[in-house]
Amino acid sequence: MGFALSDMQLTSDAFAPGGEIPTRFTGEGDDVSPQLAWSNAPDEAKSFAVICHDPDAPLVKDGNYGFVHWVLYNLPGSTSALAEGTGEGTAGVNDFGNSGYGGPMPPEGHGTHHYFFWVLAFDRELDLKPGLTLNEFLKQSEPNLIAMNRLTGTYRRA
């Protein structure tokens, strides 16, 4: 299938689609991941992953733009939601150089940034090692990607 949007829907109790992400979920707050839930996943989905990416960040690294805030994978096919501050799944490395979630923290005076929370569905269980970067994760998982969609939130640093 490749990287095309599907009928899956991703929602959060923390913010509305296109809405402002509360400070609690940012680097200026408690820096915990927001609650997420998805529906309409394909019946053949055997595992899921979640990614958070800021395409507005003025960075280019290894030929890629933006800033990766979260890479989470090896989520079982029975998963359809993640609690706030989840410890589920296997954490990859974000662009802060840390494992797990790192909330929005755009440069001061840089205006409003958009944060794309992606859910990806795969046709097999992923058994990938911890600590993969986004590029490493996508390279290893893309052949098994069957569906994906996103929820966008915004944040402007105070």
Image: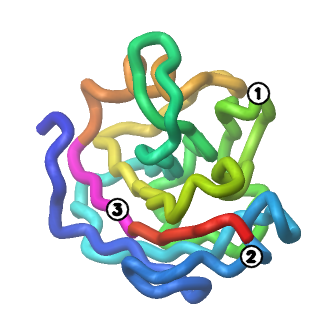
| 51 or 8, nearer to the observer | 51
Which region is colored magenta? 146-151
Q: Which residue is labeled 3 in the image?
A: 150
Label 2 sits on what residue type? Answer: Thr
Residue under the image location 56 percent in, 42 percent down? 73
Residue under the image location 40 percent in, 67 percent down? 152
- Residue 23 is marked as 2
Report the number of discs: 3
Per the image, label 3 sits on a secondary structure element best described as: strand
Q: Do the residues labelled 3 and 1 touch (CB within 8 Å)?
A: no
Q: How far apart are marks 3 and 1 (CA)?
A: 23 Å
Q: Distance between the residues labelled 1 and 2?
A: 21 Å
| 124 or 137, nearer to the observer | 137
Which of disc 3 and disc 2 is earlier in sequence?
Answer: 2
In the picture, the quarter occupied by the C terminus is: bottom right
**Dot 3, crowdedness within 10 Å: few (<14), some or many (≥20)?**
many
| Residue 36 position within the rendered picture, expressed as x and y whole percent measured from the top left | 55, 73
Label 3 sits on what residue type? Answer: Arg
Q: Which residue is labeled 1 in the image?
A: 97
Whether residue 147 sits left or right of residue 70 in the image: it is: left
Is residue 147 within the magenta segment? Answer: yes
Q: Which of marks 1 and 2 is in front?
A: 2
In the image, residue 53 above or below residue 87: above
Q: Which of marks 2 and 3 is in front?
A: 2
In the picture, the quarter occupied by the N terminus is: top left
Whether residue 7 sits left or right of residue 37 in the image: it is: left
Whether residue 140 sits left or right of residue 44 in the image: it is: right
The image quadrant of residue 25 is bottom right
